[in-house]
Image: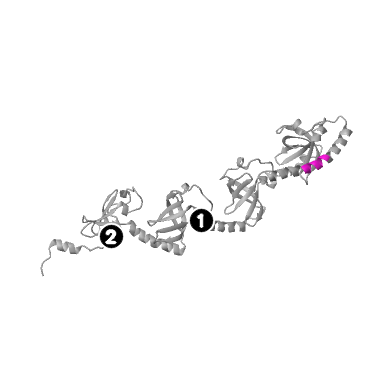
Amino acid sequence: MSELTFEQMLEESLKTIHTGEVIEGTVIDVKPDEIILNIGYKSDGILTRNEYTNESNVDLTTLVKPGDKMEVKVLKVNDGEGQVLLTYKRLAADRGNKRIEEAFNNKEVLTAKVSQVLDGGLSVVVDEVRIFIPASLVSDVYEKDLSKYAGQDIEFVISEYNPKRRRYIGDRKQLIVAKKAELQKELFEKIKVGDIVEGTVKNVTDFGAFIDLGGVDGLLHISEMSWGRVESPKKVFKVGETLKVLIKEIEGTKVALSLKFDDSNPWKNAATKYAVGNEVTGKVARMTDFGAFVELEPGIDALLHVSQIAKEHIEKPSDVLSVGQEVTAKVVDFNEEGKKISLSIKALYAPEVKEVEEEVADDADVVSVDIDAVIAKQEAEEDNE
């Protein structure tokens, strides 16, 4: 038997490799755009940045260091210069494909960081596999601007898996819908009419505010925002603000809310404060042809009929009064059940007591009728608004 040369013995001691084979190597040098590995072959393996990751311009020296061991896949045994070309990302992608397939089949919830915000949705990477989440599947509500998701970790499921076309679609919406349904069920099992709960202002409109109660959005209508009048909800509430609200009504999945708490009801002590004969002061809140509504306090408006504004005859309230003007008058009628109060400035003047009493009594009948008409008219106008 002939003796082998040193070179022959060295070559025989080295393993053989083939294209497509998965091998392990040890990092012996790292450059910003290239990694060199000892793969136990006669030539070292070269792993370029493009074959390490899909992220462009990344500095490999920040990710890998000499001595690290890596599993790689052989792309070419000889690149023409005697070097072995390797890939890491394709091996990771192969394994990632299996991982995504398993997640798709098992309906597994995945978590990944948003790597790109695109015009039509979000892009995430799981084990070197890019997954696209369309804008319509990002949330259960339409979101025009998706930039807030950049760099965020989000949860999703794989709704479409097609490795031949490299089409991998993620769905975050169904997780949000399912979570909300769960929270909604839990909430409805706990709450009832009359409860006071805490919520967060989610949206404010001209007619009210939607309050997130934790899985259910309740409506706080403008008429329930205060015992007094609220002209514009947008001037009162801000999105994100926390409120304690009263559950006024539950109908199916709809919840009506209120800020009219019973302990702050201005009508509680109204019978004493606004008893017939009491002299009161308030501000003109609004006017009609029949008279002026005077706000005695938030939530309590009294009608000053046109016939009771002055001793002399006037055609309409605006001839002598203006909105915001402070007036002093006497209570001539108090209806607690109907929550109606009638005032008279004329009654403050008493040259002849008997004459005034008769006149006020006559006018009170007129006022009582007109209050109903005016309030009905006001409510109709507010509904039309």
Please name whichever residue, 136 or 203, is drawn nearer the observer in this view of the structure.
Answer: 136
The reply to whether the C-beta atoms of the residues labelled 1 and 2 are less than 8 Å apart is no
The quadrant in which the C terminus is found is top right
Q: Which mark is residue 74?
A: 2
Type of residue at label 2?
A: Val
Q: Residues within 10 Å of mark 1 (few under 14, many from 20)?
A: many
Disc on the earlier residue, 1 or 2: 2
Q: Which mark is residue 173?
A: 1
Examine the structure image and report whether residue 372 is included in the region drawn in magenta. Answer: yes
Looking at the image, the residue that sits furthest to the front is 165
Q: Residue at x 72, y 45 (%)?
A: 380
Q: Main secondary structure of the magenta part?
A: helix
Q: Residues within 10 Å of mark 2 (few under 14, many from 20)?
A: many
Please name whichever residue, 184 or 168, is drawn nearer the observer in this view of the structure.
Answer: 168
- Among the 4 quarters of the image, the one containing residue 132: bottom left
Please name whichever residue, 226 or 138, is drawn nearer the observer in this view of the structure.
Answer: 138
Which residues are drawn in magenta? 366-373
- Among the 4 quarters of the image, the one containing residue 80: bottom left
Please name whichever residue, 91 or 30, is drawn nearer the observer in this view of the structure.
Answer: 91
Looking at the image, the residue that sits furthest to the left is 2
Q: Relative to residue 24, is residue 283 depicted above or below?
A: above
Q: Position of residue 82 (x, y in %)?
A: 21, 56
The quadrant in which the N terminus is found is bottom left
Left or right: 98 as drawn, with respect to 148: left
Give the CA separation, mark 1 to mark 2.
Answer: 40 Å
Task: Work out whether residue 224 can be spotted.
Answer: yes
Q: Position of residue 334 (x, y in %)?
A: 80, 41
Q: Secondary structure at mark 2?
A: strand
